[in-house]
Image (spheres, rainbow, N blue to C red):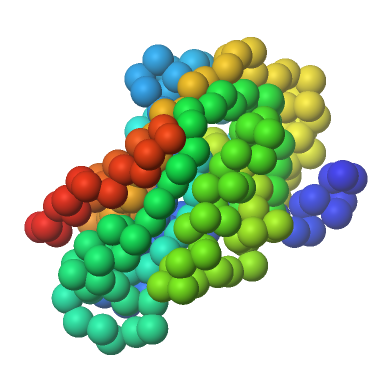
Amino acid sequence: MKYMNLEKNISTENWKPFKGWGNRKDHIVFLIRFNKEIRKKIHEYQKKLLPFNCFIPFPENYFHITIKPWGFLNKNKENTDDLTQDEINKICKKIQINLKPFEIKLEGADIFCDVVYLKIKDNGMLKKINQILIQNDEIPESWRDGNNFIAHCPLGTFRNKNVGPLSSFIKKHQLPIGKIKINQFELVIARWDKTAFPLFLPLKVFSLKKESIISNKVRKSR
């Protein structure tokens, strides 16, 4: 991708991941989080990008792979994408993930219009989980789902559009992190509450094995 075209499409620091509208600050998201060891390795690579003035890093505890954004937790159904606690409980009981654990590989960084991200090699397994989720009529499909789904781990966003030198750097410096075993994914609340980035509050864990795991109770929201 040429720098001119890339810079034309860059979004800068006004972009806020999982940001709600109005008073809706509890976004419900299916995702994968990394253990401390993997986060540390990703953070070491991320630090190499800090000298570039255009780059705004995401905090280490934000590193994740989004599988499917869902809606917003709300006590009352005020919007079409609002979900009550009871609805989440009932829908989660219907979700059946009959997949075995699998391996993924972080294959180096790249740039999209609003993020620097790590590319994921997973032989289509994360897309398969996404497709299983949207088969449920109560989990609406968006343009990012199905065949358009791209697994990635966000590293940061942009302060300005001068991304040419950063783009050149990340093409030459990849992330030697190896393979990661994926045994589970989570349903979390991505909550904005006087924080620079959303906090992930766990609701439910889906374990990957031959039998689906649907017995965990969704925690009551505080």
At 48% across and 58% down in the image, what residue appears? 133
Toward the viewer: 65 or 51?
A: 65
Q: Residue at x 70, y 57 (%)?
A: 147
Residue 35 visible in the shown view: yes
The quarter in which the C terminus is drawn is: bottom left
Image spot of residue 169 (x, y percent) = 75, 25
Q: Position of residue 78 (x, y in %)?
A: 28, 86
Which is more toward the observer, 69 or 93? 93
Residue 217, image x, y percentages? 17, 51
- In the rendered structure, the answer to whether residue 16 lies left or right of residue 212 reads right
User: Number of numbered discs present?
Assistant: 0
| Picture residue at 68% right of the left edge, 34% below the top | 123
Image position of 64 with respect to 216: above or below: above
Left or right side of 111 for 87? left
Residue 109 vertical placement versus 40 (above, below): below
Task: Give percent across and percent down for residue 200.
Answer: 30, 45
Would you say residue 48 is visible in this rendering? Answer: no
| Quarter location, residue 3 | top right
